[in-house]
Amino acid sequence: MNTVKVGVIGCGHISRIYLENLTNLFEIVEVVACADLYEDAAKRRAEEFNIPTYCSVEEILLIPEIDILVNLTVPQAHAEVSLKILEAGKHLYSEKPLALNREDAEAILALAKVKNRLVGCAPDVFLGAGIQTVKKILADGWIGEPYAAFGQIVMGNGYDAMHPSFPSLLKPGWDPLFDMAPYYLSAFINFFGSINRVAGMAGNVQERFTVTNPKSAFFNQTLPIEAPMHASAVLEFDSGVVANLQASKASFGYLPKLEIYGTEGILQAPDPNFFSGPILIQKENQEIKEFPFTHSYREDTRGIGIADMAYALRSGREHRANDQLAHHLLEATFGIMESSESGQYVSLQTKVKRPQPMPLDLKYNVLDN
């Protein structure tokens, strides 16, 4: 197979699952280099996954054989690194969010157009068995006409402060709207199409947080909470569906929920942050049935969006976790925050095509029939 050469920038925690899948699961991609600000981090990942080259960020940009560079840096660095990737003439795949403001997002998309490069962006979980099966159930009419949906993620934010970069978890990019809501928004867009307008409220229970865990490196420090840690939103889709979204990192534990309400049934979908989970339908007679998966990729397959992008490069088709989806999702996120400040609905200016469903009965390691 004519493989697509991939390099990875950012060798922190999330890189492990990406590299595990990119080096072991998808034959169309070949990881040829990894880079990090800290050489030891890049060396560790290179040795762990038998990657032939580890180097600095500046050096990886100059490797001519690389087709796609994957940006797994911290959210505050996404835009800067992504622009460097495109300037180097590489196709870009970024962890979410694509950017932390409108100007940077638009600059990335504009440069990609000038350079004639593809842009992809997480989340790609919607390509897995769970969301793809729900998408088919809806298309096949099992719950009649969908008219409403509800998404919820309520969780903590590492308030034991044991994370080595705990203060960064209190900044924009790690907040629930940028970090967790994209899983729900990407699922909703797959189900219902473009978002027409949003209304939202976002805020904090407290403005500062004092670390009380004596085992933490930040013990007794009082840190500012610089991003809203809980948000509620109403989303109106062009299709007429109205969805409610609740996203919070102001509590504890992990409590996800995704439901879709139709004229002939209620569908309980899997957590969109995972690739599988129970799919239940309740009909008018109150009977609840669990549906089997119709699609492949039930395990944690993060990085599947990069493999899908590689197939797109080879075939000329459109990749699914694409720039237009990322842009629309970001505009919805910014719209929720702007609505919270203004007290007004915010109409979205972008539109997006629903990504094509994944093929049925895919063979192992393959994304196209």
Image (cartoon, rainbow, N blue to C red):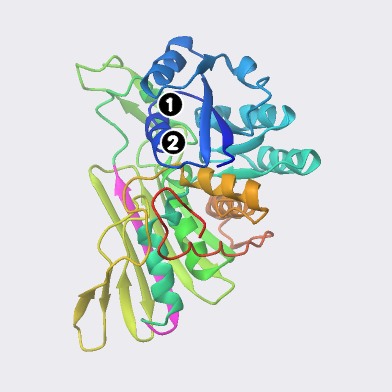
The quarter of the picture where the N terminus appears is: top right
User: Measured along the vertical axis of the image, is residue 72 above or below residue 118?
Assistant: above
Q: Work out whether residue 89 or residue 354 is closer to the camera in this orientation and state it.
A: 89
Question: Magenta stretch mostly in which secondary structure?
Answer: strand
Which secondary structure lies at badge 1? helix
User: Measured along the vertical axis of the image, is residue 127 above or below residue 113?
Assistant: below
Residue segment shown in magenta: 143-155
Q: Residue 144 magenta-drawn?
A: yes
Which secondary structure lies at badge 2? loop
The location of residue 280, given as percent across then percent down, is 26, 71
The location of residue 217, given as percent across then percent down, is 29, 14
The location of residue 110, given as percent across then percent down, is 76, 42
Horizontal arrangement in the rendering, residue 114 relative to residue 229 (left or right): right
Q: In this orientation, does residue 323 appear?
A: no
Q: Work out whether residue 287 or residue 338 is closer to the camera in this orientation and state it.
A: 287
Label 2 is placed on what type of residue?
Trp
Question: Who comes first in sequence, dot 2 or dot 1?
Answer: 1
Mark 2 neighbour class, 10 Å CA radius: few under 14, some 14 to 19, many 20 or more: many
Q: Residue at x 46, y 51 (%)?
A: 366
Residues at discs 2 and 1 in contact (Cβ within 8 Å): yes
Mark 1 neighbour class, 10 Å CA radius: few under 14, some 14 to 19, many 20 or more: some
Horizontal arrangement in the rendering, residue 121 relative to residue 48 (left or right): right
Q: Residue furthest front?
A: 1
The location of residue 77, given as percent across then percent down, is 57, 27
Q: In this orientation, does residue 108 appear?
A: yes
User: What residue did someone put label 2 on?
Assistant: 174
User: Measured along the vertical axis of the image, is residue 210 above or below residue 264?
Assistant: above
Q: Residue at x 55, y 70 (%)?
A: 237
Q: Residue furthest bottom?
A: 285
User: What residue did someone put label 1 on?
Assistant: 168
Q: Work out whether residue 289 or residue 158 is closer to the camera in this orientation and state it.
A: 289
Query: How far apart, in angstroms, are the residues tagged by discs 2 and 1?
Result: 7 Å
